[in-house]
Amino acid sequence: MWTYDKILQYPAQTCGKNLRMAKNVLTQYGGPDGELGASLRYLNQRYATPHKEVRAILTDVGTEELGHLEMVAVLFGQLTEGATKDELIAAGLDGYNIEHGCNPFYINTSGQTFDTYVIGSKGDPRVDMYENLAAEQKARITYENLIKMSDDERLNKTLKFLREREVVHFQRFGESLRLIDDYYSTDRYFYKK
């Protein structure tokens, strides 16, 4: 189903160690509006839509979100590389480091672990698509907030790339909603407008 190229979609880079930002970017790894939740949401929702093109869009975007998850993990690794015990303690990452080392883990900025409660999937393609539109906007604003917190030019370039992909996904889901509405407005499905 997938072909995996062993390159990132965009060269994720930072200017070096920054434990404060490392802790912050984890929210896009395992936070409620992060890449893991998005990928799982879209890859699950594709089974409930009767529209072939919408299924393809959900598969494409869900797969791309997995690639973004990988990019966030690379950023976290670069932001924590070479961190000392004292630096980890000062950044409030000592407990995190005891549990996970400097591997990314599925948590938000408050340390709450990822839970599937954040995945909106109702089985009604219209409802799911509205959920997706909202999810992409929440991810976009989270990236914007991360950019505001960072002085790292390279990190910000990567975060801006990821933010722009959220905008593209929002547009794709808008197209999908129109396709779904067209589908439901015909005699092919029992819903009527």
Image: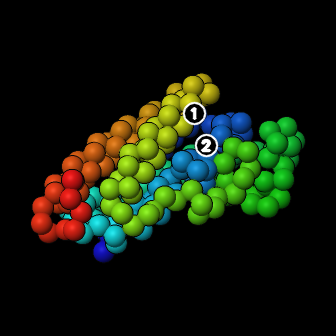
- Left or right: 35, with 31 as reference point: left
Rendered location of residue 173, percent (x, y): 30, 49
Mark seen at residue 32: none
Quarter of the image that includes the N terminus:
bottom left
Q: Residues within 10 Å of mark 2 (few under 14, many from 20)?
A: many
User: Which residue is tagged 2?
Assistant: 25
- Residue at image coords 78%, 53%: 96
Q: Is residue 36 visible?
A: no
The answer to which image quadrant residue 25 occupies is top right
User: Residue flagged by tag 1: what amino acid is it?
Assistant: Leu
Front-most of 124 and 56? 124
Rendered location of residue 93, percent (x, y): 79, 47
Is the Cβ of the residue at disc 1 closer than 8 Å to that at disc 2?
yes
- Residue at image coords 57%, 56%: 118
Residue positioned most to the left: 187
- Left or right: 117, with 183 as reference point: right
Front-most of 40 and 18? 40
**How far apart are labels 1 and 2 at the CA level?**
7 Å
Q: Is residue 50 visible?
A: yes
User: Which residue is tagged 1?
Assistant: 146
